[in-house]
Amino acid sequence: MDNYIQKLLKRIGDMMDGYMPFEKLESHVLEVKDLSGARDVADWKQLYITVSAFLNTDGGLVLCGIKENENEKTYKLTGFNSEHEDKIRAELTSGNHFTDDERNPLKLDHRNISFKLFNFRGKQIGVVNVHPFADDEKFVFYRKTNTAYIREMTGDKKLTQAQLEAHQEYKRELEYARELRPVPDATIEDLDLGKIQQLVKLLNESGPFLSVPDSMEEAMSFLVSNYFIKNNQVTLLGMLFCGKNTFYHLDKRAEVDCFLDTTDKAFVTADRRYFKGTIIPLMDDSVQFVARNIKVATSYEGNGKAVPEYPLDLLRECINNAIAHRDYKSNRPVQIIIQPDQKIVIKNPGTFKQKMLIEIPEGDETIYRIAPPRSLPESKNPKLANFLKEIQFIENRGVGMATLVGEALEHRIGMPYYTMDDDTVILNIPTGNILDFKTKAILGIYDRFISNKLTKKMNRESAETILAYLIKAEDMDAYERATILLTKENNHLQTIRDLAKVKLIEKHPNSPKNHPVYRVHRQLRKTEYYNELREILGENQFKVLSDKEQQMLNAIYINQHFGRIYNLGNEEENKTHFWETISNFLTFDTYESQTDLKNLAFFQDNFFTLNELLDNKKLIIFSEENGYQINDSTT
């Protein structure tokens, strides 16, 4: 943690010196506060509010002694008065400022909060490191305002009464949580001292220093405080983390099955593995299996650096989250299936909470979206999840969904989606890119329509990425696949606002109140204009055309009315771009499942020949302004 803070301070220093452009560093886990003028407890009110928000969300760091001026895009070093060090440390842990949800005084300790001074350019910076409460221990209230706060984006937000009541219901559901139930016939002798020692060492890497126990007697306080032992009985939680023979006691709850779904003989020796044991090795072994069996390419942009088919950090996060948040009532393993060149599938025993599922009837189909939780607890296993967060093995529930969306919007994976049955959540992570051949073909043939709506200040690449994501989401609905809702938490907030403002995207009229479901302008979803062509050419002339000729005319019609604006007089350049746009659209529209590039080129050659036939029939003409267009004078 010290290294991270030193790197953070260096970045701030570089921005102060002009070596780096100003960047707003505050996030849902980082707050920058001045506090240079703070004299007593009353002046630290905003610090206590932020601490409350961090305790109730994902934890975080508060840097005291740096002033951020977002309007002037500057940072100013004000320093923290070291004379207040003992006072603020005492106040933070005094029990005077925080209460639990029953308004009993809450005294924080080293497990929740720590304070340390760092030297920076001749002054002191105070750093408050806050570790979150487990979901079933929340919420923490700031005593002076009698209010609980959570962290959203870069701000501290008051919890509403409805959110507090919902959390009380959640806590009642957890009273008989599976993770805290005793393991039948297990005793303290079934726990492994070596594994306990390793867990303590992992905790010490990111939090306060704890003594590594040399015996089970010395380990008892650690085991009890982390609910590995409750009422003198070993819990499922304890067996998962430090059991000697975990699979014997927990059966398939302590198993992950990994498969390589391929007929390629090169992979036969590693096509399936059944990992069994405690939770940390389960996570490590599963991630290593996937890393060994996904493809690796050479990046020319990265000077020959090896690039995996999927981002390994993303896979690690998704696998670890699946194991951590699975339903331990079910005696079935987590399953990971690798389908080379297609996707990775992670099957997780359990279900989504009903409030996360969005279903909107839309004609003959239904819109399916998953709404990530907004900073509120959702884990079925809060103690397990909290401990894994402490040792930095998982992120908060919902952050994994934000990462999936982020990686898709950064073009590192295809469109992620979920399928579900009664008791299994199935995450599918396709390879590829959401700006694939199909979405590029649609956006290309509607180039003028899009350009006329975008403003000069809008980033074209970001706009097309969001449009592609929403097009993909609608395509998935036809197959009853649930995609992750775009929200202000998961990426490209400004682009979403800009696209909505220029009406390239819109909120579905039947969206839930707090979860707007965006969709692209309806024009971009229309790919057939055969009725318009019948009106132009006449029914008799249109119906004698072959299917290929009708498809060609349809593509030309779209491009004529919505496609690129051409440079006048540059006929050859116009023709080249026109053919690229038309052939790409026709290829996806007619041969959508075709992925072989050589065959795509073959189909494109056919369309070139087809155009000559149409040109000879005088059904199309060439215009310098619009390229080839429908000849409406033939009727």
Image (cartoon, rainbow, N blue to C red):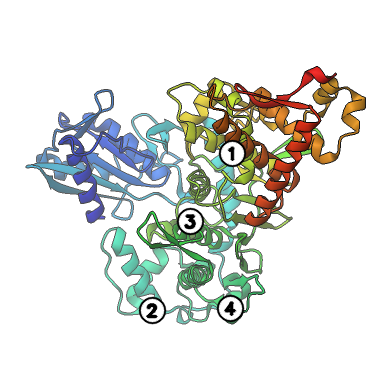
The residue where tag 1 is placed is 468
Q: Amino acid at mark 4?
A: Ala
**In the figure, residue 111 lies in which quadrant?**
bottom left
Vertical relation: 531 (above or below) 138? above
Vertical relation: 212 (above or below) 539? below
Residue 336 x %, y %: 60, 66
Disc 1 crowd, CA 10 A, few/some/many (<14, 14-19, 20+): many
Q: Amino acid at mark 1?
A: Ala
Residue at horizontal 59 percent and vertical 22 percent from the top: 503
Residue 437 x %, y %: 61, 45
Q: Is residue 591 visible?
A: yes
Label 2 vs 4, first from the N-terminus: 2
Label 4 vs 1, first from the N-terminus: 4
Disc 3 crowd, CA 10 A, few/some/many (<14, 14-19, 20+): some
Q: Amino acid at mark 2?
A: Leu
* Residue 443 placement, left or right of 553: left
The residue where tag 4 is placed is 266
The residue where tag 2 is placed is 193
Q: Of residues 238 and 462, which is closer to you in this image?
A: 462
